[in-house]
Image (cartoon, grey):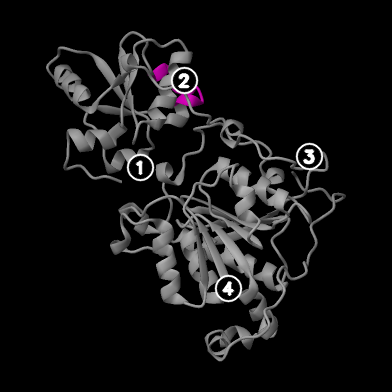
Amino acid sequence: MASSPTAPAAPAHLKPLVEPAADLTRDEVERYSRHLIIPEIGSLGQRRLKNAKVLVIGAGGLGSPALLYLAAAGVGTLGIIDDDAVDLSNLQRQVIHGVADVGRSKIESARDSITALNPLVDVQLHNVRLDATNAVEIFSGYDLILDGADNFATRYLVNDAAALTGKPYVWGSIFRFDGQVSVFWEQYGPTYRDLYPEAPPAGSVPSCGEGGVFGMLCAAVGSLMVTEAVKLITGVGRSLLGRVALFDALGGSWREIRVLRDPAAERVTALADYEAFCGIAPAKQPDAGHSVTAAQLATMLAARQAGLRNFDLVDVRESGEHEIVSINGARLIPQGRILAGEAWAELPRDRDIVFHCKAGTRSAAVLAAVQDAGYERVSHLEGGILAWIRDVELGKPVY
């Protein structure tokens, strides 16, 4: 919602979120001494941190620095929710994991790194995908949520589950060179739905896995998320509630925008179907007549090279992905341009077209869209370029 001079603003100061623990041990006093000598934190603030229970959604780009700094700060209980495994491509930015963790569960890898840094922290693992069936129950066990999710459906789910449980949460978002951080708390100020009342059209915004992310950006945004968390827990400083901090890593600049609660917005009373809300409900699966395997595509390309077939192979990934690895003879037209209707003139109706992406999901969505637009001579590559690398060109890089 746009700012207005007459709209009520979020409170400048909030009371401490967590009651203090009874005391600090001698080891804790030594470990956290640099906090203890800050007047605004002191023993009271550190005891609040010791008593705090914080849930971090995702042990990835933002979760990695957030978890490490929360643990170093002395947050007593850290929950981690993630159902993914560590991949080699994660190590460019997900600093909580190492080479030895590739293939391991992210939450187990993160737990081991936290324990190595601060064994005083109690780590709770949630090896599940956050959804409408478990979010409220999981959130209920924590004082504060840090949302490092990388998709819109989960962000709206987090917002609504936090509203239902009365929890504040710190939100962070990254893409390429840009980062955003804010605090949302329905009880006291605006929520994510006030910032983004409508989800962007499905496929119009590439994910970090599709569009890339500047690795160091994760540290800047993740550390600011922890700063906001510590401020909420201890009650010090001015919260980002009602403001969004925007970081431009290329320009080396921070700025902020004000966010106000929409007085006409309905309060959250139940969770919903967030994939449907974001326009990403499961698409119909292409039938066998509109799918080709990697081996079949290799035969088709050989026939085209020999002048025996005429068809277009269209790569619907992003340009950066195409530069990393591509199939010889493929033409790049990113999914977003097709779904937005910008590339129809580049897709001939009078010959066959085969679409491909990384793993088959985006190409299936494009296939459904062009079929709805009346294209008949279209198909897509099952399993995407990953299947091509596995079955045809084994030496090409996987990303």
- Tag 4: residue type? Gly
**Badges 1 and 3: C-beta atoms under 8 Å apart?**
no
> What's the distance in space between the residues labelled 1 and 4, CA to CA?
41 Å
345 is higher (above) or lower (below) than 153: above
Element assignment for label 2: helix
For marks 1 and 4 on the same chain, the one whose residue lies earlier in the sequence: 4
For marks 2 and 1 on the same chain, the one whose residue lies earlier in the sequence: 1
Q: What is the tally of numbered marks visible in this picture?
A: 4
For marks 3 and 2 on the same chain, the one whose residue lies earlier in the sequence: 3
Element assignment for label 1: helix
- Tag 2: residue type? Ala
Residue ID at (43%, 30%)? 335
Q: State the image coordinates of residue 346 (x, y, percent, origin top left).
A: 39, 19
10 Å neighbourhood of mark 1: few (<14), some, or many (≥20)?
A: few
Residue that carries the numbered disc 3 in the rendered image: 265
| Residue 76 image label | 4
The magenta stretch is: 338-346
Residue that carries the numbered disc 2 in the rendered image: 369
